[in-house]
Image (tube, rainbow, N blue to C red):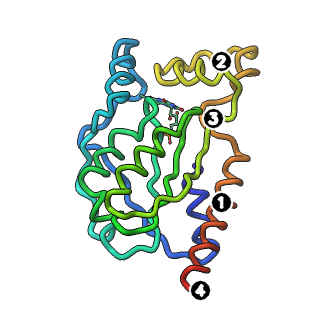
Amino acid sequence: MQLKKFIAGLEGAGVETTQERLEPITPYEFPFRTNLRLAVAMVTTFFQRRMPIKPVAAHCFDSWDCIILAGPTWSYNPSGPVLDFLDRYGKDVCGGRLVVPFISCRSYWQLHYWTIKKCLGQYNSKVEKPVVFTHPVKEPWRSIGLLLTLRGKFAWQKYAWLRKHYPKYGHSEEQGVDAMAKGRQLAEKLLNNATG
Ligand SMILES: Cc1cc2nc3c(=O)[nH]c(=O)nc-3n(C[C@H](O)[C@H](O)[C@H](O)COP(=O)(O)O)c2cc1C
């Protein structure tokens, strides 16, 4: 949702955009059927397991002024599809360009950002500070709610006492408004660069 709003902010301010979804060849499991499968996913993503994606479309290789590289954090790292994108297309799509990482996570995103910065740095990309949206709930509820959601245990939503601490998984409406404002800000910067 935040990404859609961010793009709406960019387009509303007069910036032309195009989007490409990084589509895994084998769709990943969500929610995870067992605790073991979740644990395996956590460990393998911690070690940056790539998740091969389908080829990206030709328009990705056009001369864009800015690439928004959006995706969730998985075990402190960029997600498997984004890691595969960086390996295979980082140079040709992002090389020498302005790149803005757009990160959706529970709370930890720094390593995700550094990994993108380090990888694209070798292709002379200018990697900006990331746009980050964390889950707006206090710990430990934020982690408990995420783990239950990843396991497809939505029954907890029935319990009012738990809902009080963890109203919903993911991001809030307010963050959507913020995302649109951040999109507008980036648009102004890009338009100034183009005219200045
Ligand atoms: C396998 C896995 C590992 C995750 N590890 C982290 C993590 O290390 N740090 C974090 O902040 N969030 C972590 N998350 C939570 C996601 O980053 C978070 O739910 C994010 O908002 C998902 O974005 P999306 O709804 O756009 O897919 C993990 C999620 C999954 C599925």
Is ligand 1 less than 8 Å from the beta carbon at label 3? Answer: yes
Towards the viewer: 16 or 112: 112
Pointer 2: what residue? Answer: 140
For label 2, the crowd category at 10 Å Cα-Cα, with few meaning under 14, some 14 to 19 and many 20 or more, is: few
Pointer 1: what residue? Answer: 182
Label located before the other in sequence (2 or 1): 2
| Disc 1 residue type (three-letter) | Lys
Is ligand 1 less than 8 Å from the beta carbon at label 1? Answer: no
Give the image location of residue 64, x and y in percent.
41, 73
Give the image location of residue 56, x and y in percent.
28, 59
Above or below residue 79? Residue 23 is below
Secondary structure under the numbered disc 3 in the rendered image: loop
For label 1, the crowd category at 10 Å Cα-Cα, with few meaning under 14, some 14 to 19 and many 20 or more, is: some
Towards the viewer: 31 or 135: 135
Which of discs 4 and 1 lies nearer the camera? The answer is 4
Pointer 3: what residue? Answer: 135
* Quarter of the figure with residue 194: bottom right
